[in-house]
């Protein structure tokens, strides 16, 4: 397919790679965080680290919706499904996230919970329409990309008086998480030199919300598409900013992202949601103004209120380093149980579940790097 | 006395009902009018519980495969020809010449006879084209809601020439890995149809019987160590199986793996990796480096092997990792699939 290959061309990659190698001269190196799980996945899947010099280090960020969901939130969903006998609709990635008591939504399903995998909020609405005698709860997770479809679903449900539909609203915000990461930076072993900014999220919110990171924290941000060449180009742009002593928001993904973003989507989101005072993230702890809840006019669609299931915080598994990984302080291979006790088939932490999770990506695509192998390139 | 008269099956409007599996007259009629006529051959028309076959010299291979595909009809084929090809290919991957097939049907009550006839005709055609007759069969009917239209299990028998031994545990470091054509066509034909996606160039299943190609390959004098058809789980899964069985690693070159443009686009859209998508008319061959040219030549000459490519080589690796140099020039692992291959969420 022309459209895709254009962004995966090996020859072009070589050129960008050579430029990076030539220009990445700072002895102190470049520590760049790719915020998004989509970028983490692309970097692992295309082996981009092989095309970077040793002093350019990519640090995985918290931009994986499933990964940042704390155990207590998954417990909440499981309780709804098991104790309140609702039909719980969820995206596939969430099914296998480990929760308390050795459960996950998938295991709850095996115990009789009515958990259904959906591809979109529209599927969830349909389930609600088709089962008027049952309560249907949609597990609404994700960053700004998945928020507008949820907002539309709520508006539809309200218009249709679909009173058996509600959502567990776990929508979270990208800029808030970046603030959280930078504000704990003092205690970090590795200082960040810049961010590869999200692709899809930025199509919605635009590039403007990243400006404080350049202006106030003096960190360059380059918004990049999810194609491997996008990521490489963004890395080169970040290196140039660092070299020039600049801290700006640059946009590599101009084919989809504007400064203002998608105003229509923002408007719909604003009509339906407002900020939560605080929300607990896995790894980042409680972050103020970092998540959304339904506005009071839509209260009746809020499953947390409707069913009175409180959020009970639960500590991560002791051995699991997901928290440190999501803060960018550790790498998957730094976890003692990586690839031993924790694998995609039997995940212990959330980062091993979604294909966008740092541990899953490293396990699936990159773990050979920790094991020297006689692997001569084909002649 | 009047000769008993049964009205012939109303194929156009009729449906499968419970009596078609009861062992009574309607079952006999279904078998006679639908199956026997289509599959017609001397062994089947013996009319016994089993087929009495001529004696065969040589080692036998037997394989069986159940087919539960949904939708039953898809671009490039249907469950009928798929069931014939699938088992023929399993027999052929052992290096055997497939000789006979048995077919067993589980029909769901209410299934339209006209669809059943279409499926049976497609099986008959596939079996005749392949030269492998369906010599015995069975039919059962399950209540409505207990099946998905039709499930078909086929079993095949074949014979291996003397001294030939193909196996998944024979790959050795230095060996080359050949792939007979594009990957992901079958799986994506099904997936896109299920999701209601349409493309400018439709994605067509590659379902095909590979024993002709295999026979050409075996006859060319090259020493083949392993043959596999990368069906469920795709190329990645099959290579991991071979790597594990042989206790070796592999290094693939992504740029050499053929993928149809529409398949790549559809995979991208749904969030799948073509390496893990099912094929039904492709094979992987592993041979020593000195045999590659010979093998490539005969495969390229065969209609089902025109796009054959050398996609990688076998390495020494105690971890049995399958690695790949990406189109971009980086390295990645091509791991076993964890769970199902699920679409991404954002
Ligand atoms: S390897 Fe598993 S347990 Fe360790 S940090 Fe990753 S997800 Fe958590």
Image (cartoon, coloured by chain):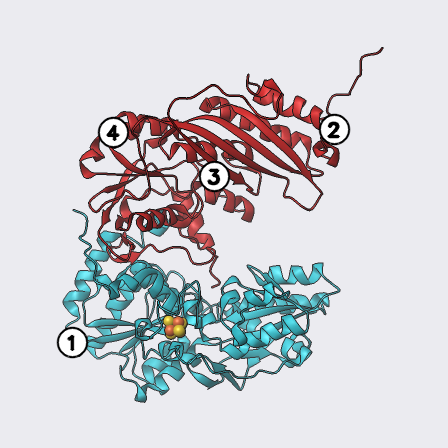
Chain colours: A cyan, B red
Q: Which of the two discs, 4 and 3, sits closer to the camera?
A: 4
Question: Residue B233: percent from the left, percent from the top?
Answer: 43, 48
Do dots 1 and 2 share one subunit? no
Q: Looking at the image, is mark 4 or mark 3 earlier in the sequence?
A: 3
Q: Position of residue B323 (x, y in %)?
A: 28, 54
In this rendering, the label closer to the viewer, 4 or 2: 2
Q: Which residue is rendered at x = 46% and y = 37% of the image?
A: B204
A205 or A307, which is in the foreground? A307
- Alpha-carbon span between mark 1 and mark 2: 85 Å
Q: Earlier in the sequence, mark 4 or mark 2?
A: 2
Q: Position of residue B312 (x, y in %)?
A: 25, 45
Category of crowding for the residue at label 2, using alpha-carbon neighbours closer than 10 angstroms: few (below 14), some (14–19), many (at least 20): few
Mark closer to the chain start, 3 or 2: 2
Q: Residue at label 3?
A: B202
Q: CA distance from mark 3 to mark 1?
A: 51 Å
Farthest-out residue, right: B1
Question: Looking at the rendered structure, which numbered label has been put on residue B24?
Answer: 2
Mark 4 vs 2: CB contact within 8 A: no
Secondary structure beneath dot 1 equals loop
């Amino acid at each position: 397919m022309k459209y895709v290959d254009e962004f995966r061309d090996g020859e072009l990659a070589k050129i960008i790679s050579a430029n990076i190698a030539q220009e990445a001269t700072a002895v102190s190196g470049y520590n760049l965080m790719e915020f998004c799980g989509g970028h983490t996945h692309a970097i692992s899947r295309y082996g981009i680290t092989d095309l970077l010099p040793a002093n350019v280090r990519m640090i995985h960020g918290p931009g994986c919706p499933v990964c940042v969901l704390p155990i207590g939130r998954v417990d909440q969903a499981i309780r709804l499904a098991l104790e309140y006998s609702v039909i719980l609709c969820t995206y596939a990635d969430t099914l296998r996230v480990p929760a308390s008591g050795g459960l996950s939504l998938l295991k709850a399903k095996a115990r009789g919970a009515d958990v259904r995998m959906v591809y979109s909020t529209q599927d969830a609405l349909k389930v609600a329409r088709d089962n008027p005698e049952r309560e249907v709860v949609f597990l609404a997770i994700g960053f700004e990309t998945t928020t507008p479809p949820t907002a539309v679903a709520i508006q539809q449900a309200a218009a249709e008086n679909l009173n058996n539909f509600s959502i567990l609203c776990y929508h979270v915000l990208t800029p808030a998480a970046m603030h959280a990461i930078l504000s704990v930076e003092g205690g970090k072993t590795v200082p960040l030199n810049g961010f590869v900014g999200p692709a899809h999220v930025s199509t919605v919110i635009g590039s403007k919300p990243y400006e404080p990171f350049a202006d106030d924290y003096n960190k360059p941000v380059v918004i990049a598409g999810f194609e491997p060449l996008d990521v490489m180009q963004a890395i080169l742009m970040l290196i140039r900013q660092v070299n020039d002593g600049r801290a700006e928001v640059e946009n590599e993904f101009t084919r989809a992202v504007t400064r203002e973003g998608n105003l229509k989507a923002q408007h719909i989101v604003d009509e339906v949601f407002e900020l939560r005072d605080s929300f607990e993230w896995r790894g980042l702890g409680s972050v103020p103004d970092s998540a959304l809840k339904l506005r009071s006019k839509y209260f009746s669609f809020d499953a947390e209120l409707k069913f009175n299931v409180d959020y009970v915080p639960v500590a991560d598994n002791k051995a699991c380093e997901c928290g440190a990984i999501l803060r960018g302080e550790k790498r998957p291979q730094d976890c003692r149980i990586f690839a031993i006790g924790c694998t995609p088939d039997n995940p212990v932490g959330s980062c091993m579940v979604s294909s966008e999770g740092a541990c899953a990506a490293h396990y699936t695509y990159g773990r050979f790097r920790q094991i020297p192998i006689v692997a001569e390139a084909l002649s | 006395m009047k000769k008993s008269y049964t009205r012939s099956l109303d194929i156009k409007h009729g449906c499968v009902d419970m009596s078609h599996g009861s062992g009574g007259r309607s079952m006999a009629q279904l078998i006679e009018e639908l199956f026997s006529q289509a599959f017609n051959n001397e062994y089947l028309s013996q009319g016994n519980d089993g087929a009495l076959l001529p004696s065969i010299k040589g080692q036998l291979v037997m394989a069986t495969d159940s087919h539960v595909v949904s939708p039953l009809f898809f671009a490039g084929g249907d469950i009928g020809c798929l069931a014939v090809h699938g088992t023929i290919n399993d027999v052929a991957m052992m290096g055997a010449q497939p000789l006979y097939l048995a077919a067993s049907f589980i029909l769901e009550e209410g299934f339209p006879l006209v669809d059943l006839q279409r499926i049976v005709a497609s099986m008959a055609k596939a079996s005749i084209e392949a030269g492998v007759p369906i010599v015995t069969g069975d039919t059962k009917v399950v209540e409505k809601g207990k099946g998905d239209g039709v499930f078909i299990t086929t079993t095949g028998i074949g014979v291996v020439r003397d001294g030939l031994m193909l196996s998944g545990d024979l790959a050795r470091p230095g060996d080359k890995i050949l792939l007979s054509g594009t990957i992901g066509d079958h799986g994506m034909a099904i997936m896109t149809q299920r999701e209601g996606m349409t493309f400018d160039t439709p994605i067509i299943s590659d379902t095909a019987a590979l024993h002709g190609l295999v026979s050409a390959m075996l006859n060319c004098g090259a020493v083949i160590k392993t043959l596999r058809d990368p069906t469920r789980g795709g190329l990645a899964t099959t290579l991991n199986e071979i790597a594990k069985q042989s206790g070796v690693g592999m290094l693939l070159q992504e740029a050499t793996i053929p993928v149809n443009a529409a398949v790549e686009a559809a995979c991208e859209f749904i969030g799948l990796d073509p390496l893990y998508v099912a094929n039904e008319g492709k094979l992987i061959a592993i041979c020593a480096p000195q045999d590659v040219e010979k093998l490539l030549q005969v495969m390229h000459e065969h209609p089902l092997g025109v796009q054959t490519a050398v996609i990688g080589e076998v390495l020494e690796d105690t971890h049995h990792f399958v690695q790949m140099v990406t189109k971009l020039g980086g390295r990645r692992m091509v791991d076993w699939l964890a769970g199902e291959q699920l679409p991404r969420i954002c």
